[in-house]
Amino acid sequence: MSRLNKELKIRISSEDKERIKLKMEDAGILTMSAYVRKMALGGIGIRLDLKDIRQLTVMLRSSEPVR
């Protein structure tokens, strides 16, 4: 049996739902329920975009050493 057995209902506008959905996707959270729970309990969600850093690291590792 799931520990998540209570339901919380809220009413929001279509615009707010879309904004929440976009923020949820940006945070990399897969369900709106998980996102709303995380934000309600933790108050902050941070996701760093490290794609450029990873790409730079790969480039640095593959380059010839300087002599």
Image (tube, grey):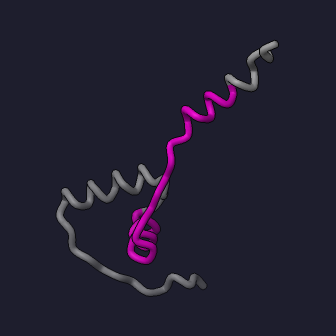
Name the residue located 67 percent from the left edge and 23 percent from the top edge: 59
Q: Quadrant of residue 62?
A: top right
Q: Say if 62 sits above or below 22 in the image.
A: above
Q: Say if 13 sits above or below 49 in the image.
A: below
Which stretch appears magenta?
Answer: 32-58
Q: Which part of the image, by quadrant, shows the C terminus?
A: top right
Q: Is residue 8 left or right of residue 31?
A: left
Q: Quadrant of residue 33?
A: bottom left
Q: Is residue 40 magenta?
A: yes
Q: Is residue 36 left or right of residue 15?
A: right
Name the residue located 55 percent from the left edge and 36 percent from the top edge: 51
Where does the image place residue 23, in percent across and percent down from the top left? 36, 54
Q: Quadrant of residue 11?
A: bottom left
- From the image, give the main secondary structure of the stretch colored magenta: helix
Q: Which part of the image, by quadrant, shows the N terminus?
A: bottom right
Q: Is residue 53 magenta?
A: yes
Q: Say if 32 sits above or below 51 in the image.
A: below
Where does the image place residue 25, in percent across and percent down from the top left? 42, 51
